[in-house]
């Protein structure tokens, strides 16, 4: 009897360490183009950015609470970028995930995709005993103490880029420069909630959760392919 | 002239904000080249042009939120004024018959143009598209 079970599609997990925002952006673009051409399977890129504030396409300048020059003096880069959403901060202690997924091979539904990303993080946080969930009208992942993960996505020909940022041990003081996502609500981190899990453990939980939610077989690949 | 519509990017989505036109009226555009960007909640999406031609007019300005299937602009594909066409490709079924021509889009199961359904080159299948006579 032939094995009729259909194997889950592959997704390559790439932990890229600390990467400047612009470099990670360029890398995403290359993976997106290769994904569009069908040369590679779905990807989950995991990075950490040095301090950076980014403004989405439909961001409002008033949600940046200081001039970009002042950010510069504080050692924080500033980038306008093509993801959805308003302003956000990335920095050390945060897990930034950039899934490059061809939604034609999952669901052609951008909202279902965003809800699925939230689920990935909600399930991963549950592994560490953190109860997180959604808030109506405020995409992202929320706990009783505030927002713990932000989401912003770009889609081109159904291939996704940008993604999520989960605060593991982020220095939350850096959020004082912005009104995160244009919402005047507090932000929090796993560490602020008393969870001392280390980054690798959280990355592993996120990857497991991603595989489950998107029905993907994760293949770990540390090196960046020669693009 | 080909009508360009606000595509439906998922079942629960009823409207979208046109955030940026990537072409100006009069500029030439290739088929599948990004034409404008839309935003729904936390997602920005590039919408490719359904045909090659020149961007004729912009009917929905940047920053405006409109319902799905709203005509946002027109592309002059050189086919002349006779028979302005517009075709939607509904995400499922054929409820979304084109308001302008009453025809199903090529993505529709009822479409006569079976060949178009095999054209799996992306967003166009469920978003914006020209009529089957454009070789879509």
Image (cartoon, helix red, strand yellow):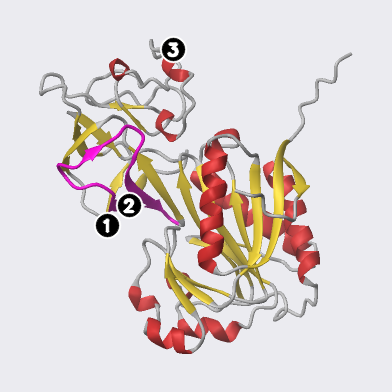
Residue B134 image-quadrant placement: top left
Q: Residue at x 79, y 66 (%)?
A: A200
The percent coordinates of residue A140 (x first, y second) are 56, 62
**A129 relative to B32, above or below:** below
Could you tell me which chain the residue with mark 2 belongs to?
A: B
Q: Earlier in the sequence, mark 2 or mark 3?
A: 2
Residue on which the image places disc 3:
B114
Are the residues under badges 2 and 3 in a single subunit?
Answer: yes
Say which of B51 and A60 sits in front. B51
Residue on which the image places disc 1:
B63
Disc 3: CA contacts within 10 A as few (<14), some (14-19) or many (>=20): some
Residue A129 image-quadrant placement: bottom right
Is disc 1 placed on a helix, strand or loop? loop
Say which of A136 and B100 sits in front. B100
The percent coordinates of residue A197 (x first, y second) are 80, 73
Q: Residue at x 74, y 54 (%)?
A: A207
What is the distance, in whole Å, between disc 3 and disc 1 at their CAs? 37 Å
Magenta range: B18-41
Residue A134 image-quadrant placement: bottom right
Depth check, mark 2 against mark 3: the one in front is: 3
């Amino acid at each position: 009897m032939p094995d009729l079970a259909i194997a889950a599609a592959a997704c390559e997990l790439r932990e890229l360490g600390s990467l400047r925002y612009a470099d990670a952006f360029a890398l995403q673009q290359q993976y997106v183009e290769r994904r569009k051409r069908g040369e590679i399977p779905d990807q989950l890129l995991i990075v950490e950015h040095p301090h950076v504030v980014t403004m989405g396409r439909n961001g409002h300048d008033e949600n940046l609470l200081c001039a970009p020059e002042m950010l510069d003096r504080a050692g924080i880069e500033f980038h306008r970028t093509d993801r959805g959403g308003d302003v956000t901060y990335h920095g050390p202690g945060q897990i930034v995930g950039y899934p490059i997924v061809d939604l034609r091979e999952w669901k052609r539904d951008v909202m279902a995709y965003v809800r699925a990303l939230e689920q990935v993080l909600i399930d991963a946080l549950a592994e560490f005993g953190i109860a997180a969930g959604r808030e109506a009208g405020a995409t992202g992942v929320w706990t009783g103490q505030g927002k713990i993960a932000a989401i912003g996505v770009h889609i081109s020909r159904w291939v996704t880029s940008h993604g999520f940022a989960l605060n593991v041990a982020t220095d939350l003081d850096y959020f004082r420069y912005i009104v995160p996502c244009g919402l005047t609500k507090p932000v929090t981190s796993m560490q602020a909630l008393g969870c001392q899990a280390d980054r690798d453990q959280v990355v592993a939980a996120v990857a497991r959760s991603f595989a489950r939610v998107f029905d993907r077989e994760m293949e770990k690949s540390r090196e960046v392919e020669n693009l | 002239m080909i009508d360009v519509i606000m595509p439906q990017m998922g079942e629960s989505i009823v409207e979208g904000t046109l955030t940026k036109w990537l072409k100006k009226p009069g500029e030439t555009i290739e088929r599948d080249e990004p034409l404008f960007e839309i935003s729904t909640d936390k997602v920005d999406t590039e919408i490719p042009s359904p045909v090659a031609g020149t961007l004729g007019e912009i009917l929905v300005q940047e920053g405006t939120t409109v319902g799905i299937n709203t005509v946002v602009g027109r592309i002059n594909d050189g086919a002349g004024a006779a028979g302005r066409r517009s075709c939607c490709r509904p995400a499922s079924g054929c409820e979304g018959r084109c308001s302008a021509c009453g025809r199903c889009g090529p993505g529709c199961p009822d479409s006569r143009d079976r060949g178009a359904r095999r054209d799996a080159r992306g967003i166009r299948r469920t978003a914006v598209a020209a009529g089957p006579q454009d070789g879509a």
